[in-house]
Image (spheres, rainbow, N blue to C red):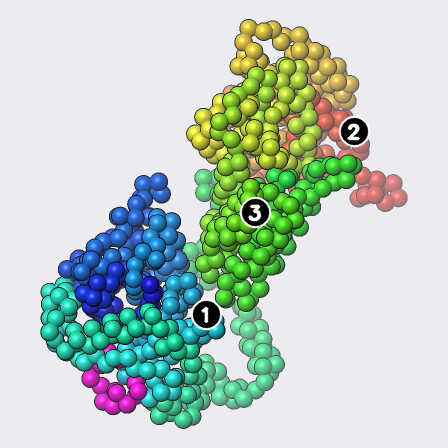
Amino acid sequence: MIQIALYGKGGIGKSTVSSNLSAVLSDIKKRVLQIGCDPKHDSTRLLLGGAIIPTVLDYVRETSQEMQQLEALVFEGYGGTACVEAGGPKPGIGCAGRGILSSFEVLKRLGLRASSFDVVLYDVLGDVVCGGFAVPLRKEYADAVFLVTSGEYMSLYAANNILRGIRNFEDANPRVAGIIFNKRGLFAEEERVFSFARAVGLPVLVSLPRDEVFSQAERAGKTLAEAFPLSTPASIFRELAKYIETLEKDRSLLHHASPLDDLELEALVLGRREKPCIKPSGIDPALYNKTATELYSSRQENSHSTEISSGTHETKPAETPEEVSTALPTACTLKPPLYGCAFSGAVTATFQVRDAATVLHGPRSCTYITADALAYSYLRGGGINVDGIEQVPCILPTDMKEEEVIFGGLEKLESKIEEVLSAGWQTVFVVSTCPGGIIGDDIREAALRAGVHFPGARVIPLPVEGVLTGDFSTGLLEGYKKIADLIDPSVKPEKGLVNIVGERSFSPREEEHFRSIEGVLKKLGYRVNCRFLKGTDTFSLRSFKKAEINLIAFDDPETRILKAYLSERFNLDFFELPFPVGFRESSIWVKKLAERLLPGEDFSTLLQEQEELYRAEIAKYISYLSGKRVLVVSYTEEVGWVLDTIRDLGMEIIKVGISASFCGSASPELLSHEDFLLERDYTDEKRANDVRTLMPDLVLSNYAPSVHEEGVHYDTIPFSPQVGFLSGLELAKRWSTLLRLPVVEGWKYDGGEEC
């Protein structure tokens, strides 16, 4: 079997050469696969009677993965040839080179194997413009590369550039077969082509004449072997087919790539011996010979003079997108900020499995920043305590450098995975960054190869590829899905067990929240089976389905998606309410959970005990806070527990302002209150005005304002409030102390006089 890549300048006739070569190879009983690697997707047209077949990229975009079949992409052409078109994005949109990578991955996933054929022909777009189009040059695809060229300078320039690309990927074994000369009928064309061939040390294998039979066959939608088998060009292709038969058996006929530099190529083809000297436009001739420092100083002087205005500003009507001023976003246009890339999200998930290692395939900048942030946040959030020592899960980077980014980093990745497995880790996640995805590093292949010598170990690839896949949330959910693969679907539920899903990974209070919920569950006779995903291990994950019911920690978009995924995949039962905050929410939560798990049993005593405790604690602060006026400013309407606490303390809510934000959702319960003013799209200016006119004793907000208005105390609403019945107590304690302090602090006085 031999794999052949045909390269050359766009429009030079590669598709015509490829199709006619495939046809004559099939005539000598060769099993031939031709893959068109051009967005024009017309490489195989002549083999198919002029028909244009569906492309791989169009097919995978329109067909769900579980419905995809190889038979829908491989078409039988003349002489039994197998025809495939990779396709590509629309002109000017996307990355066609990346499309080649994706197409090859799809074909491999669907079961297309080069070993099933005698000859595989890759007809590749134009020049080697990026890593995607260079894929067929790599040793796993191309055994031999044929250069198609005419005598035009740009055609020979492209051929020379392709040799540069081959040299980048070439190892000790040569892979250049030679030149296919497709004549254009230019003056002195043969002289230029053969001179170039001698200069780069390659043979001209065949010379194809400029013959009308090519056009006639193309109009008929046929190859020469089918339409004009006795023509001279058809016989030339048969000679080339015989050469390929010989080459298949004897690779010593191949040559190393020896490209010329640009000046050598121009001298050879154009006869130009000196490089022309031109000056950049827009630069004063007097400045052209100045030093960089002098030029910089001149530009600084010029820019300074143009920035000085007359003191007036002329406003023109906005007519183009560039002239339209950008207004501040409103509540309906705000979108959640991006907290990081998919790589960071995926690692945040895998990092939680404490008896698994994570290999990060990427450059030092990506891996160091992510790993350092995770380790710091993890320890700050409680970490894992083993024998009194805080442990950080294993993270090992491949530390891709420029060499790996250019030539590929799979060998380095495979070596790192084997290193981790040799250290005794039985579960290893492999997560990729942007560079690996852009250059086409297939981490799935590296994971498979590295795991061969370690029976029983699991190497789990996550090809999220940084921002190529999406943002942090996308990567986090992809990580969750891969971790969910560790769940044993055959396990049956057991009475008395619950799972907790969707805890915030690194909140400093998450363990406090967990202990609070765990305490309530114990009073109901239940214990926690698995936390998905908070410092868990592979054993807990395998036993995940033992839980009778699953509790969600927070009702946020990510948790809702995770809940839907786990429910559908494992047919799980979820409790509808998230962890409660505040006495009222906690009472409702316990009642509903008890009705769900233990119908008919009476837990009123438990609720009564909690209420007595709450009322007793709140009573300690009422004398200090009763009658105080409060202005509440929040990004979200989910502040019912704060409002309940204010009322329970005998304080007065004079107004609630909801700032424009992506956070939270409308709260009908909040809107139903009529004992305070409610204003949406609340701004800092409105807050300052309300402080002056409404004169509150206390302003509560999600953030402390940069400039405080005088005569009022400020406090923040906790981002991660305490879970459970006693949530409001921490606020009551703070406020009772805060409101006993002077409004204007002592350092603002000078000699007893207020500033």
**Mark 2 or mark 3, which is nearer the start of the sequence?**
3
Mark 1–mark 3 Cα distance, whole angstroms, equals 30 Å
Does any portion of residue 475 appear in the rendered image? yes
Q: Residue at point 42% right, 66% down?
A: 138
Give, as a three-letter code, the residue at label 1.
Phe
Q: x%, y% of residue 350? A: 58, 42
Per the image, is 402 magenta? no
Mark 1–mark 2 Cα distance, whole angstroms, equals 71 Å
Please tell me how crowded label 1 is: few (under 14), some (14-19), or many (20+) other residues with Cα within 10 Å. Answer: some
Q: Residue at point 17% right, 75% down?
A: 235
Look at mark 1 in the image and give the residue it sits on. 169
Look at mark 3 in the image and give the residue it sits on. 454
- The magenta span reads 181-194
Horizontal relation, residue 263 to residue 642: left or right: left
Front position in the image: 421 or 510: 421
Look at mark 2 in the image and give the residue it sits on. 737
Front position in the image: 416 or 196: 416
Front position in the image: 304 or 258: 258
